Amino acid sequence: MKIHQIIKLILKKYAKNKKNKIKEIIKIIEIGINKTFDKWKQEEEIEKKLIDTIDKISKMVLNYNFPIQYFQTFVEFGCSRRCLKLYINPYTLIPRIETEILVEKAFQRIMKLGIIKKYEDILIIDFGTGSGNIALYLTKLLNNNKIKTIGTDISFNALKVAQKNSIINNIEIFLLNSQNLNMIKKSKNTFLILLSNPPYLTKKEMRKELYFEPEYALLTIRKTFFYQNLINFSIENKPSISFFEIDKKSFEKLLPFLLKNQLKYSISPLQKSIYMLEIFNIK
C-alpha cells in the first residue's frame, strides 16, 4: 500500500472530523515507518507490518486520545538556540509551551535581579521534576558553575527519566525523592531558587486529553495544598525566590494565604488561563 492510500484509510477509519488531522496522521506515519516527512514520498510502498503498526498507533491516538508524544519518545523543549532533547514516557507529564515560558520568564527575572552576581552559592530546586525539563532548561540558560540544581519527584520512575535526560543533554543535576526534602541542607549564605509546576487540578477538572498522563503529577485533593507547602519551605530557606505555574482558581484560593503571611508576590500570564506566580523572600 502506498502512503497516500494509507492517509486516506486512516482518515476513513479514525478521523471523523477530517479538518486539522492530516498533520497528526503524517506524524503517526513518520513514527510507524521511522522516517521524517521530507524523506518519504506519497507514492512510496509500505510493507504490511509497518501498515499494521501505523494502524495501531492511529487507533490509540485518534480514537482514544493517547498522546502521540509518548510514541515519539523524544520531544524538544526550549528556544531553538538552547533547545533540550527530552525523553518522555507515561511516567512523566508531556512538557508544554506554558512551562517553557515559565522557565524563560524565571530566567529573565533572575538576571534582572542580579541574583547570580550578588550571591556566591545558588541552589535551584525543581519540585515535581518529571522529565527534568524545568531543572535542566533553567540550569542550561543560567550556565554558571556556582549553581547547584536538584530535581525532586515522588515517582522513582520519573526520576529515572530525569536522570536519562540529564545524561542526554550533558547537564548535571542532582535527583531526590520528594519525601526526602528534609535531607536538603542549605547554608544561610545560599540563595534558593524554587520552581514548580505542581499538581493543581481536582478530579472534576480533569480533561480528556490528560487521561493518559500520570495522575500524581496532575491531581490534588486541595487546590492550594502543594503551593502552601512549597511556599513554607521557601520561607524557611530564605533568601529565596519561587516561581510556580498556577491556574486562576488556585491563585484565588491561595491569595488569602499570601496576604496572611504578608508575602511579596507578582502574577503574570503564561498561556490562556495559566499564570506564573512569583514569590519573593529576599532579605
Image: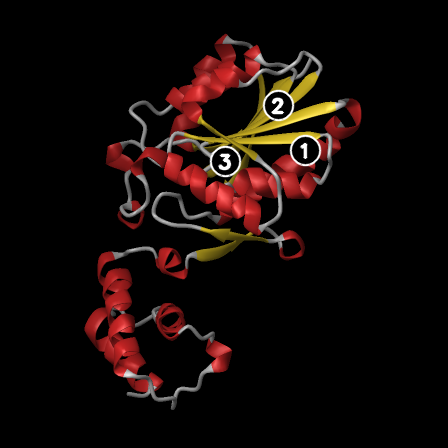
Colour pattern of the rendering: secondary structure
Query: In which quadrant will I find the N terminus?
Result: bottom left
Q: Residue at x 29, y 24 (%)?
A: 221
Answer yes or no: do the residues labelled 2 and 3 have beta carbons within 8 Å? Answer: no
User: Which sits earlier in the primary sequence, circle 3 or circle 1?
Assistant: 1
Q: Nearer the viewer, residue 150 or 4?
A: 150
Q: Nearer the viewer, residue 254 or 230?
A: 230
- Relative vertical location of residue 264 with respect to residue 205 in this rendering, above or below: above
Q: Compute the Cα span from label 3 to label 1.
A: 15 Å
Residue ranking furthest to the bottom: 43
Residue ranking furthest to the right: 117
Indicate the position of residue 261 as horizontal and vertical percent values: 52, 9
Question: Secondary structure under badge 3?
Answer: strand
Answer yes or no: do the residues labelled 1 and 2 have beta carbons within 8 Å? Answer: yes
Q: In the drawing, what numbered circle is on residue 275?
A: 3
The residue type indicated by label 2 comes to Ile
The residue type indicated by label 3 comes to Tyr
Q: Quadrant of residue 19?
A: bottom left
Task: Write down the residue under mark 1.
Answer: 109
The crowding category of the residue bearing disc 2, from other C-alpha atoms within 10 Å (few below 14, some 14 to 19, many at least 20), is: many
Q: Compute the Cα span from label 1 to label 2.
A: 10 Å
Residue 185 makes an appearance in the image = yes
Q: Is residue 82 left or right of residue 267?
A: right
Q: Compute the Cα span from label 2 to label 3.
A: 16 Å
The crowding category of the residue bearing disc 3, from other C-alpha atoms within 10 Å (few below 14, some 14 to 19, many at least 20), is: many
Query: In which quadrant will I find the C terminus?
Result: top right
The crowding category of the residue bearing disc 1, from other C-alpha atoms within 10 Å (few below 14, some 14 to 19, many at least 20), is: some
Task: Write down the residue under mark 2.
Answer: 241
- Relative vertical location of residue 79 with respect to residue 156 in this rendering, above or below: below
